[in-house]
Image (cartoon, helix red, strand yellow):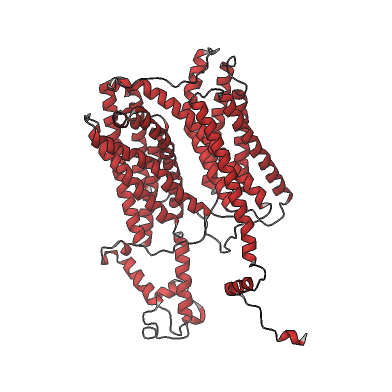
């Protein structure tokens, strides 16, 4: 025992681990712990991708009328995926209930209340859509397969169960059964993505048929109109009722599409959080406040009201005649260009304030925030693809109708606006809330001032310096020369005299906060406004016909059908991110 005391201590840290490996000892514990998790993550992601690819191929086969592939095969595949997810969610909820007394780690950034509220609203509309589909099946029961009646019922049950699961477990950080949970969660992610793709496919086919029917009114007679129709081959038992249901279904599809993409992102955050170690410091609670945003809200609501009017007029005018169609296109481009210009100015102002504002950056690991940033940039590429296609078509076209020169500034601003808005949102979500910044500043001042024997300045006393540190001495300037207390005093003097210089850093903190909140409220309402036109059939990319002449009808339609869903989702995701920015500011 005595001899053992004189043995050299075992090496620690990275060097020690490397030395142990060189001597043939066991590898570091971190490597052993990390390897199975990475392996499970890789295996589960490959499983999910294979499920997704198989589903997409089945959808493609149905869309192109492949021999031997009917809609019943596609729906049977989707029903099977939903049933597997339901079984996994039941197992997870049951196990969580049995272990309810255990203390579980939570990710405070994931599953915010406003996000769960949004998914609940979209889920309710999705269930209404399911009821419409059941009514449609009843009307055409003679010639529809049984799966078309089973699917909306299974989808409604799946929707209710999924919303219940996300309300109760969206913040969970799973530390047990991690491999099994990875497969269950990634299965849920790609099941929702396939249901999203199915909704996009059905809605796009409907929009394309309407586009083909009215394209001839613009004078493009060289385009052959062949409707890609999957309508039933029998007559409805109640023609008027089936017509209303058919039209209602396609007006509800945008909400169903948003529901599934939101659900898939929430499940993805859960998947990324498996086995994660959460930082122990608490995060400030984000609250919704409506005070001081009258300007941004009023302008945003004005844009929203104009949007509804423009969409109504557009849908009435387009396809009536060539003159009315061109007038509708010009009206839309003027409206959209003005809206985008306002959004560019607002975004630039917000970025300018953030760049000149001294705030604490949040550099902690946050899967939810990283996903938000990636989705903003990734989905914006859909709109950029369409906009660059329009710009190229305008440049290369031999003939330029009157609406062409309104389309050019609209396309350029669509690219610029998303670039600036993404920068504004990413700048915002990577900063601590203002209350947190003020608390850090106060603690810093108290800590430094309390280490000095000199008395506190009024600034330090205002920031909370009390007790012995405030009564030990009566001299301050020569001892606290250039210290934080004097700097805080200068900052407060600048806030009390904002006209000292022209920089935005001289503005009072409350004024900057109010400007940023007005910008966030305005951009939030504008993104809701710009989500409405493409979601409900106002799509000039289809109707102006110029791009179809330059690129060809089928290539341009493929580009629009691939890019448009991402463009629509971008607007809704931007609105959600801006709502979070508003609550944090």
Q: Residue at x 60, y 42 (%)?
A: 187
User: Which is more toward the observer, 221 or 361?
Assistant: 221
Quadrant location of the N terminus in the rendered image: bottom right
Q: Is residue 319 visible?
A: no
Q: Is residue 369 above or below residue 165?
A: below
Q: Residue at x 47, y 80 (%)?
A: 470
Give how far across and how far down residue 447 sits, in percent. 48, 76
Asked if residue 141 lies left or right of residue 291, the reply is right
Query: Relative to the observer, which residue lies in front, 431 or 522?
Result: 431
**Is 180 on the left or on the right of 466, as rendered?**
right
Q: Is residue 404 above or below residue 482?
A: above
* Residue 506 placement (x, y as % from top left): 31, 64
Q: Which of the 4 image quadrants contains residue 70?
A: top right
Please state which of residues 455 and 431 is positioned toward the viewer in this rendering.
431
Count of numbered tags: 0
The residue furthest right is: 1
Image quadrant containing the C terminus: bottom left
**Does residue 472 appear in this view?**
yes
**Residue 97 locus on image (x, y percent):** 71, 48
The x, y position of residue 277, in whole percent, is 60, 60
Residue 151 position (above or below residue 583) = above
Image point (50%, 23%), residue name: 65
Q: Residue at x 56, y 16 (%)?
A: 140
Determine which quarter of the picture holds residue 545.
top left
């Amino acid at each position: 025992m005595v001899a053992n005391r004189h043995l050299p201590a075992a090496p620690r840290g990275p060097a020690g681990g490397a030395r142990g490996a060189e001597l043939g000892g066991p590898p570091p514990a971190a490597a052993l712990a990390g390897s199975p998790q990475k392996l499970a993550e890789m295996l589960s992601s490959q499983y999910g991708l294979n499920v997704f690819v198989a589903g997409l191929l089945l959808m493609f086969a149905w869309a192109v009328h492949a021999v031997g592939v009917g809609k019943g095969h596609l729906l049977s595949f989707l029903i099977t995926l939903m049933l597997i997810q339901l079984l996994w969610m039941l197992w997870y909820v049951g196990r969580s209930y049995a272990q309810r007394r255990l203390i579980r780690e939570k990710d405070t950034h994931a599953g915010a209340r406003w996000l769960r509220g949004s998914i609940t609203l979209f889920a309710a509309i999705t269930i209404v859509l399911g009821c419409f589909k059941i009514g449609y099946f009843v009307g055409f029961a003679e010639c529809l397969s049984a799966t078309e009646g089973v699917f909306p019922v299974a989808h409604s049950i799946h929707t209710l169960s999924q919303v219940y699961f996300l309300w109760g477990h969206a913040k969970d950080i799973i530390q047990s059964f991690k491999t099994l949970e990875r497969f269950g969660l990634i299965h849920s992610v790609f099941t929702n993505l396939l249901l999203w793709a199915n909704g996009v496919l059905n809605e796009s086919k409907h929009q394309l048929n309407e586009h083909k029917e009215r394209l001839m009114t613009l004078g493009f007679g060289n385009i052959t109109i062949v409707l890609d129709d999957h309508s039933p081959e029998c007559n409805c038992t109640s023609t008027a009722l089936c017509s209303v249901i058919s039209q209602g279904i396609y007006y509800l599809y945008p909400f169903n599409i948003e529901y599934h993409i939101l659900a898939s992102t929430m499940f993805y955050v859960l998947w990324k959080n498996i086995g994660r170690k959460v930082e122990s410091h608490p995060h400030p609670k984000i609250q919704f406040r409506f005070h001081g945003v009258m300007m941004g809200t009023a302008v945003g609501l004005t844009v929203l009201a104009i949007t509804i009017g423009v969409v109504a007029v557009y849908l009435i005018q387009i396809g009536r005649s060539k003159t009315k169609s061109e007038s509708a296109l010009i009206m839309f481009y003027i409206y959209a260009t003005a809206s985008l210009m306002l959004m560019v100015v607002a975004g630039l102002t917000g970025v300018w304030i953030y760049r000149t504002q001294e705030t604490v950056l949040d550099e902690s690991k946050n899967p939810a925030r990283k996903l938000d940033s990636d989705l903003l940039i990734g989905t914006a590429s859909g709109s950029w693809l369409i906009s660059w296609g329009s710009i190229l078509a305008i440049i290369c076209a031999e003939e330029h109708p009157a609406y062409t020169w309104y389309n050019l500034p609209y396309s350029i601003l669509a690219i610029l606006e998303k670039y600036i808005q993404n920068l504004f949102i990413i700048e915002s979500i990577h900063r601590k809330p203002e209350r947190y910044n003020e608390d850090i500043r106060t603690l810093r001042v108290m800590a430094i001032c309390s280490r000095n024997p000199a008395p506190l300045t009024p600034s330090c006393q205002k920031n909370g310096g009390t007790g012995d540190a405030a009564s030990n001495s009566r001299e301050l300037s020569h001892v606290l020369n250039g210290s934080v207390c004097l700097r805080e005093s200068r900052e407060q003097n600048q806030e009390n005299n904002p006209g000292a210089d022209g920089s935005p850093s001289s503005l009072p903190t409350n004024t900057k906060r109010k400007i940023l909140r007005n910008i966030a409220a305005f951009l939030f309402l504008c993104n809701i406004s710009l989500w409405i036109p493409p979601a409900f059939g106002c799509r000039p990319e289809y109707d102006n016909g110029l791009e179809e002449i330059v690129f060809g009808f089928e290539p341009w339609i493929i580009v629009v059908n691939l890019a448009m869903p991402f463009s629509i989702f971008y607007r809704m995701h931007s609105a959600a991110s801006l709502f979070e920015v508003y609550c944090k500011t």
